[in-house]
């Protein structure tokens, strides 16, 4: 099977590409290597992939590249690419979010529509819900983004849905809830907490630490993508992908300290624009439609991330 993974040098994209390679796919990975974080980290994420003769890398930008030749013949396109992060999506940064997350998605959708790709999987986000009116959030709940980033992810979802409605394009949008695990982006909280514990640095905690997040291990997210690629679902399907481990940031700090065997020195800061007080999802639809459910507990997943960080620190 020929498979395309965009954002292949990123945290989730690299794990996903490795998984479909293991099952025997021929994989084209697409990435434009933005400098949102250290590009060398992204290149390191590709190390295992580049060892495989079944993997090819296209270092192109979805916003201006000729995309039809890249997706021609693909059975599935996993669209993981996008400009991440909430805090930098405000002010002047919003232009990059619009171009990467909206324009890039629209151009890719046009390409897969033109060549009639059988399945298009879009990496959406829990950020589309914002501060929800009730929990656990369900796919039918009204989206209320609380950040410009969330607005662009919701806009991209709408693009997937309208291409499905107008042309029958088989799109599935997966709303990820706070993904963590080895190779997590360096700006994300768990990465920074673990780094603080192992290196004796201070962890800057935004807000009072009572914010609750529904954490999802990266292998479970990969499993959801693989399940969505083969599921018998209607075009324009939207599904929550959540780990079911809703805990506060203070609890996460305590768990990391326990797993690392070292205290985490916390430096408290003010609340940040765009940060919601809570996330928490119902995964009933994912179970029903995709046959998917999370398998990795927070303790187990964090343990794996701590172990990976130890190994990287020793290199």
Image: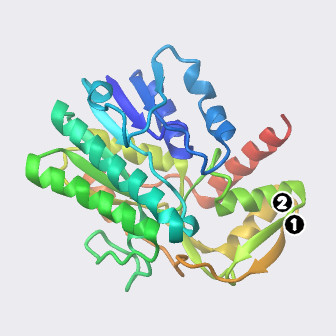
* Residue at the extreme top of the image, as rendered: 53
Q: Is residue 198 above or below residue 284?
A: above
Quadrant of residue 98 in the image?
bottom left
Ranked by sequence position, the earlier of labels 2 and 1 is 2
Q: Residue sitting at 70 percent across and 56 percent down?
A: 191
Q: Tell me residue 4's x, y (percent).
A: 37, 31
Residue nearer the viewer, 206 or 75:
206
Q: Quadrant of the C terminus?
A: top right
Q: Nearer the viewer, residue 146 or 280?
A: 146
**Which of the 4 image quarters holds residue 260?**
bottom right
Q: Position of residue 193 (x, y in %)?
A: 75, 62
Q: Is there any visible trace of residue 97 in the rendered image? A: yes
Number of marks: 2
Q: Quadrant of the N terminus?
A: top left
In the picture of the structure, the residue carrying the numbered disc 1 is 263
Is 164 on the left-hand or right-hand side of 267? Answer: left
Q: Are marks 2 and 1 in contact (CB under 8 Å)?
A: yes
Measured from the top left, where is residue 184 in percent x and y? Answer: 63, 50
């Amino acid at each position: 099977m020929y498979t395309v993974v965009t954002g292949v040098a990123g945290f989730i994209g690299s794990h996903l590409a490795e998984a479909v390679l293991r099952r025997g796919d021929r994989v084209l990975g697409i990435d434009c290597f933005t400098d949102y974080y250290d590009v060398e980290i992204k290149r390191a994420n590709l190390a295992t992939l580049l060892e495989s003769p079944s993997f090819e890398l296209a270092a192109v930008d979805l916003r201006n590249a000729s995309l039809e030749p890249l997706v021609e013949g693909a059975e599935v396109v996993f669209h993981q690419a996008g400009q991440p992060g909430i805090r930098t999506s405000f002010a002047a940064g919003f232009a990059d979010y619009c171009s990467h997350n909206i324009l890039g998605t629209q151009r890719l959708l046009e390409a897969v529509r033109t060549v009639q790709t059988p399945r298009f999987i879009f990496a959406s986000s829990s950020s589309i819900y914002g501060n929800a009116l009730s929990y656990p959030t369900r796919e039918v709940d009204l989206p209320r983004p609380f950040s410009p980033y969330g607005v662009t992810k919701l806009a991209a979802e709408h693009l997937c849905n309208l291409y499905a409605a107008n042309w029958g394009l088989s799109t599935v949008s997966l709303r990820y809830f706070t993904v963590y695990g080895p190779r997590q982006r360096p700006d994300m909280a768990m990465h920074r907490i673990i780094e603080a514990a192992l290196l004796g640095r201070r962890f800057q905690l935004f807000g009072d630490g009572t914010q609750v997040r529904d954490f999802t291990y990266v292998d479970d997210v990969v499993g959801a993508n693989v399940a969505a690629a083969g599921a018998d679902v209607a075009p324009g399907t939207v599904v929550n992908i959540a780990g079911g481990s809703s805990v506060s940031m203070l609890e996460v700090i305590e768990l990391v300290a326990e797993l690392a065997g070292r205290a985490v020195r916390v430096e408290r800061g003010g609340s940040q624009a765009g940060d919601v007080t809570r996330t928490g999802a119902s995964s009933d639809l994912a179970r029903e439609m995709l046959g998917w459910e999370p398998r990795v507990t927070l303790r187990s997943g964090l343990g794996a991330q701590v172990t990976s960080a130890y190994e990287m620190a020793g290199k």
